[in-house]
Image (cartoon, rainbow, N blue to C red):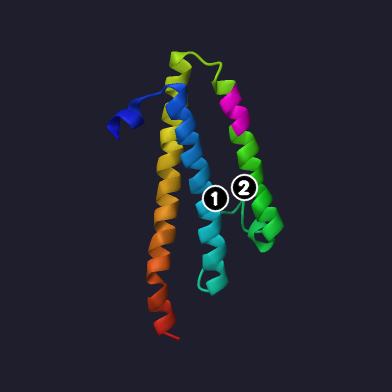
């Protein structure tokens, strides 16, 4: 695992892009599911209005990021080792933040029975 984190070759960066994308998609799924319970609200000021429409949510959280990550990967594939190292650091920061977001979603899902018991 440490080797995967430290390694900044193109193959590992591609894998990290895929993980980042999956965390992004799971963030949307968790968010929409938790909003349906009525106990939660969107805290991301950029997504507050977007989550009101499933189509806009899918465009902003699934389609647009897929295209953006594909474009970035194509540009990054032309990078040298120092640039790949910088990309890897940025990806690790992004992965950490998105992992924390998804972890908070999991905590809220685990707490749902507590909220429903109070009804």
**Is 41 or 30 nearer to us in this picture?**
30
In what quadrant of the picture does the N terminus appear?
Answer: top left
- Callout 1: SS: helix
What residue does disc 1 label?
25
In terms of image quadrants, where is residue 93? top left
Above or below, comparing residue 40 to residue 99 in the picture: below
Give the residue drawn at x 46%, y 28%: 13
The x and y percentages for residue 82 are 44, 15
In what quadrant of the picture does the C terminus appear?
Answer: bottom left
What residue does disc 2 label?
62
Q: Which mark is residue 53?
A: none
Q: Is residue 119 magenta?
A: no
Q: Is residue 22 left or right of residue 72?
A: left
Above or below, comparing residue 24 to residue 69 in the picture: below
Give the residue drawn at x 44%, y 52%: 101
Q: Is residue 73 magenta?
A: yes
Tag 1 or tag 2, which sits nearer the N-term?
Answer: 1
Give the residue drawn at x 70%, y 54%: 56
What range is drawn magenta here? 70-74
The reply to whether residue 41 is visible in this rendering is: no
In terms of image quadrants, where is residue 63? top right
The x and y percentages for residue 77 are 54, 20
Q: Residues within 10 Å of mark 1 (few under 14, many from 20)?
A: some
Q: Is residue 87 left or right of residue 63?
A: left
Q: Residue furthest top?
A: 80
The x and y percentages for residue 71 are 63, 29
Structural distance between the alpha carbons of marks 2 and 1: 6 Å
Circles 2 and 1 in contact, beta carbons < 8 Å? yes
The x and y percentages for residue 69 are 58, 34
């Amino acid at each position: 695992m440490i080797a995967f984190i430290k390694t900044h070759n193109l193959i590992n960066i591609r894998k990290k892009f895929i993980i980042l994308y999956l965390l992004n998609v799971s963030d949307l799924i968790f968010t929409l599911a938790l909003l349906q319970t009525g106990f939660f609200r969107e805290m991301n000021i950029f997504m507050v209005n977007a989550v009101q429409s499933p189509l806009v949510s899918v465009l902003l959280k699934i389609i647009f990021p897929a295209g953006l990550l594909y474009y970035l990967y194509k540009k990054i594939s032309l990078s040298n080792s120092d640039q790949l190292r910088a990309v890897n650091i940025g990806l690790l920061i992004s992965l950490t933040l998105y992992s924390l977001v998804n972890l908070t979603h999991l905590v809220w899902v685990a707490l749902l029975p507590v909220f429903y018991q109070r009804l």
